[in-house]
Image (tube, rainbow, N blue to C red):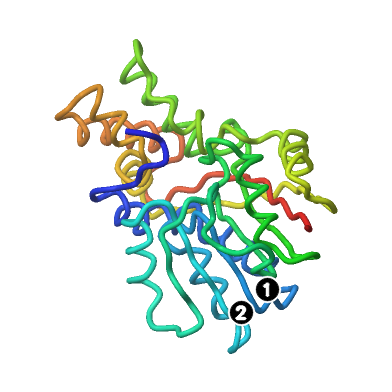
C-alpha cells in the first residue's frame, strides 16, 4: 500500500492515539501562525483527521471561509465527524498537487505534516502559490530527522529487530524523510515563494503507556500495512514487541519522549 494511503481502521486509530500523542501541539502552533494574519479565506491541504482544523477554526473571524481538503476521503470523513457544525467550513477531497480552486482564491494556506507525502513537492508548492492571493501566506510543518524524535526512532529500531532481513522503514522514509531546512527553502523558492522562514520547534510527547505509543505507530499509520505484508497474522504480536522496546527505553506507566519538527512560513 502506498505511503499516502490511510484507510480501513487506520483513520480512527490515528486520530484516537497518534493525534494526541504527537500532532495536537503542533496543530495549535500552526493555527496560531495562520490566525495571526487574520485571513478571511483559508485553505487547508492534507488535513488528515482534522487536528489543525479543530485548532484553527475557533481562531478565525465569524465571517471567514475555511476550506478543508485531503486526498484520503476516510481521513476527511473522520475530520468532518469530529468538527461539528460550522457554516464557515467546507470540505472537499482534493489532491494538493492539483487543487480545484481558482488562482488567487485564498488569503492563507496551511498544511499540517502533509508535504512529506507530496510526490513532487515543488509542484505542490507551486499549486499552493497559485491559489494564494498576492501577499498571501503559506505555513506548514514537517518532522525533523528521526534521530530527533524518540518514539519514532524506538519504533523503527524495534521493527528492524523484528524483521532483520526486510525492516519496515515507513517512518524514516516518509514522515521523517524531508528534514533539511536548506532543501525546503530551495523547493519553496523554486515554486516562486519569497520571505521564507524555517524554524525548529521541540516539544514533549506524552502517552499514558508504552502500549498507547505502540498501537499509535504500528496500527495507526501505514506501518501497519508494512508489518502485515511481512507477517499477515502478526500485527498484535509485533505491536507487543514494540511496546516492550518503548517500555525498556522510557519506563512503564506514563511515558514521554522528545519530538521535533520544522515550521516553515512563506509569502506569495
**Residue 37 vs residue 89: left or right?**
right
Question: Please, which residue is most extreme toward the front here?
Answer: 102
Instruction: Name the residue carrying label 2.
Output: 59
**In terms of image quadrants, where is residue 37?**
bottom right
Instruction: Name the residue carrying label 1.
Output: 35
**Residue 268 vs residue 106: left or right?**
right
On screen, 54 above or below 22? below
Label 2 sits on a secondary structure element that is helix
Q: Are marks 2 and 1 in contact (CB under 8 Å)?
A: yes
**In terms of image quadrants, where is residue 101?**
bottom right
Q: Position of residue 138 (x, y in %)?
A: 69, 58
Question: Please, which residue is most extreme toward the left here?
Answer: 233
Q: Quadrant of the N terminus?
A: top left
Mark 1 surroundings within 10 Å by alpha-carbon count, few (fewer than 14), some (14 through 19), many (20 or more): some
On screen, 168 above or below 65? above
Q: Position of residue 48 (x, y in %)?
A: 44, 56
Q: Nearer the viewer, residue 72 or 123?
A: 123
Q: Earlier in the sequence, mark 2 or mark 1?
A: 1
Question: Please, which residue is most extreme toward the bottom here?
Answer: 62
Label 1 sits on a secondary structure element that is helix
- Residue drawn at x 55%, y 47% is 97
Q: Nearer the viewer, residue 67 or 250?
A: 67
On screen, 91 above or below 127? below
**In terms of image quadrants, where is residue 57?**
bottom right
Q: Nearer the viewer, residue 196 or 206?
A: 196
- Residue drawn at x 74%, y 55% is 265
Amino acid at each position: 500500500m502506498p505511503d499516502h494511503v490511510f484507510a480501513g481502521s487506520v483513520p480512527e486509530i490515528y486520530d484516537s492515539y497518534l493525534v494526541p500523542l504527537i500532532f495536537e501541539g503542533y496543530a495549535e502552533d500552526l493555527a496560531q501562525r495562520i490566525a495571526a494574519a487574520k485571513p478571511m479565506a483559508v485553505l487547508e491541504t492534507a488535513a488528515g483527521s482534522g487536528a489543525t482544523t479543530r485548532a484553527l477554526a475557533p481562531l478565525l473571524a465569524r465571517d471567514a471561509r475555511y476550506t478543508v481538503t485531503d486526498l484520503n476521503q476516510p481521513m476527511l470523513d473522520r475530520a468532518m465527524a469530529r468538527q461539528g457544525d460550522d457554516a464557515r467550513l467546507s470540505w472537499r477531497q482534493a489532491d494538493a498537487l492539483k487543487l480545484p480552486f481558482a488562482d488567487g482564491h485564498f488569503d492563507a494556506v496551511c498544511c499540517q505534516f502533509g508535504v512529506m507525502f507530496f510526490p513532487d513537492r515543488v509542484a505542490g508548492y507551486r499549486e499552493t502559490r497559485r491559489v494564494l492571493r498576492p501577499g498571501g501566506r503559506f505555513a506548514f510543518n514537517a518532522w525533523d530527522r528521526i534521530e530527533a524524535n524518540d518514539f519514532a526512532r524506538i519504533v523503527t529500531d524495534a521493527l528492524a529487530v523484528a524483521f532483520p532481513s526486510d525492516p519496515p522503514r515507513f517512518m524514516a522514509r516518509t514522515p521523517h524523510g524531508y528534514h533539511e531546512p536548506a532543501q525546503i527553502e530551495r523547493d519553496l523558492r523554486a515554486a516562486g515563494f519569497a520571505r521564507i522562514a524555517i524554524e525548529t520547534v521541540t516539544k514533549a510527547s506524552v502517552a499514558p503507556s508504552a502500549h498507547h505509543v505502540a498501537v499509535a505507530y504500528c496500527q495507526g499509520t501505514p506501518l501497519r500495512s508494512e508489518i502485515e505484508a511481512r507477517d499477515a497474522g502478526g500485527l498484535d504480536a509485533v505491536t507487543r514487541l514494540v511496546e516492550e522496546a518503548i517500555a525498556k527505553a522510557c519506563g512503564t506507566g506514563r511515558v514521554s519522549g522528545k519530538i521535533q519538527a520544522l515550521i516553515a512560513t512563506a509569502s506569495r
